[in-house]
Amino acid sequence: MQKSAYQKPTINKIDFTTASKYGSPIKTQNIRTEIDGISVHELTQQFGTPVFIFSERKITELYNNLYSAFSSRYPDVQFGWSYKTNYLNQICNIFHKLGSCAEVVSEFEYQKARALGIEGKDIIFNGPYKPYEDLKIAVQEGAKIHVDNLFELDDLEKIATELNMDIPVAIRINMDTGIYPQWSRFGFNYESGDAYEAVKKMYESKKMHLVGIHSHIGTFMLDANAYKLATTKIMQLKEQVENDFGAIIEYIDLGGGFASKSNLKGVYQSVDVVIPTADDYAEAITNVIYDLNKSEKLPKLYLETGRALIDEAGYLLTSVHGYKRFPDGKKGYILDAGVNLLYTSTWYNFKIETDKRYEGDNEPSILNGPLCMNIDVIEENLMLPPLDRGTVLSISPVGAYNYTQAMQFIRYKPAAVLIDMDGKAHCIKEVDDLATVNYKEV
Ligand SMILES: Cc1ncc(COP(=O)(O)O)c(C=O)c1O
């Protein structure tokens, strides 16, 4: 029998906050040795740490699952990839290859979609701030403009005059769907009549006509019923504007907001219990359209799902740089990735897995990042065995919003790697360096 390695004895303060009803999890270790068949060690040897790893297989599985939930119920469904969720070029390309058009919320994202070869007509242009010149280009290129506010309507009126055209537009609306706080900042309110008045203003200008109605009711929506209410109100407005202004509403867009299988802080039930399924969301939306549609043709249904299509496809690999024993007895690890790379750490409890089994009992540990900032804490109370310097931790799910919102703060933004459908790993974004960071500084 192999003798186990000597462990220096320590006295651990029992921390009841980490104990479950089964007692303190002293021995349980969460281990991840590979991602899509490639060992974690191979990945870190080739690409270093910290590094974001994305799985094309998982993205494809998530996409196909959601798409079939909708397309099996409804004849005309189109997904628009929400660029802000993850706009690495190769990630956008995967979604476009799968059939998504682009959903963008700024001139930068618009230009990115165009540079990836997406035609204007296949770009949904959302967002509260669309600079005049960029809005004009989008109109000229036939993009789907989703109007957010009255100032934008004025701009569109001027653009219509400049270009001597009648612009087809969609309107973003917000409403009470029983989810609070209500997202009332974007678009025009339905219940107050603002949305109807905005459409009236469009038709009075004689320079625009309404072809679509959009709403994005919030993110991580745990109640599929909210989409029932949103669809009901969109369909009611559709009927009103078709009757009153002769509008022909070609499409409705339910935005994003479906929850991914991530553990929210403060939610103690398993994700399989609290997260609605793709079928729940699809059933809620499509049934209402069938019930309320009064036109000859069913409207095309757009969805701009972001996090639910990529969160679980993303991992962050980070190395233990060292550790300290704090005065209260807790062990604090210093990692090479911190909150600079993990924007969603504020509301997710990540799954944190070691690269192999480690000798010794678990003890409450803090995971700190590399920043010289007190707030750089990824986990405050995680039961971990004694980890060596160089241990690789895999943090997931981090596919949504973390790469796009990662800060170039104190350290360089890291590399990103895609494991393709054949199980091959490719660097899709190199680590920044001084030249890329200083680019354009004088
Ligand atoms: C207009 C719009 N559409 C789609 C999305 C994607 O949302 P989610 O990632 O919650 O699906 C967002 C995100 O905030 C959004 O603002």
Image: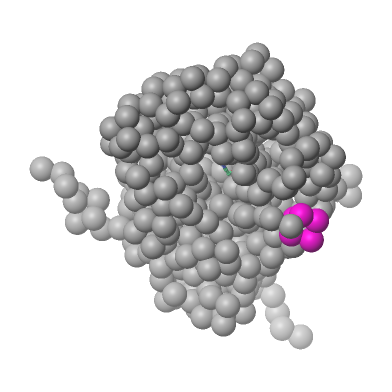
Q: With 240 as the anchor, is 115 left or right in this view?
A: left
Q: Is residue 418 visible?
A: yes
Q: Quadrant of residue 162?
A: top left
Which image quadrant: the C terminus?
Answer: top left
Q: Between residues 35 and 85, which one lies in front from this camera angle?
A: 85
Q: Measuring 56% from the left and 39% from the top, which residue is drawn there?
A: 211
Residue 87 drawn at (x, y percent) = 45, 54
Q: Is residue 402 visible?
A: no
Which image quadrant: the N terminus?
Answer: bottom right
> Ligand 1 quadrant?
top right
- When the figure is inspected, residue 216 is found, relative to residue 391, above or below; the finding is above
Q: Main secondary structure of the magenta part?
A: loop
| Identity of the residue furthest to the top in this view | 192
Q: Quadrant of residue 256?
A: top right
Residue 51 drawn at (x, y percent) = 45, 62
- When the figure is inspected, residue 131 is found, relative to residue 423, above or below; the finding is above
Q: Which residues are magenta?
A: 70-74
Residue 400 drawn at (x, y percent) = 56, 51
Q: Quadrant of residue 8?
A: bottom right
Q: Measuring 41% from the left and 71% from the top, which residue is drawn there?
A: 427
Q: Measuring 62% from the left and 38% from the top, which residue is drawn there?
A: 248
Q: Measuring 78% from the left and 37% from the top, which residue is drawn there?
A: 294
Q: How is the image coloured?
A: one colour
Based on the picture, tell me whether residue 186 belongs to the magenta stretch: no
| Identity of the residue furthest to the bottom in this view | 1
Q: Between residues 414 and 382, which one lies in front from this camera angle?
A: 414
**Label total for image:** 0
Q: Between residues 442 and 236, which one lies in front from this camera angle?
A: 236
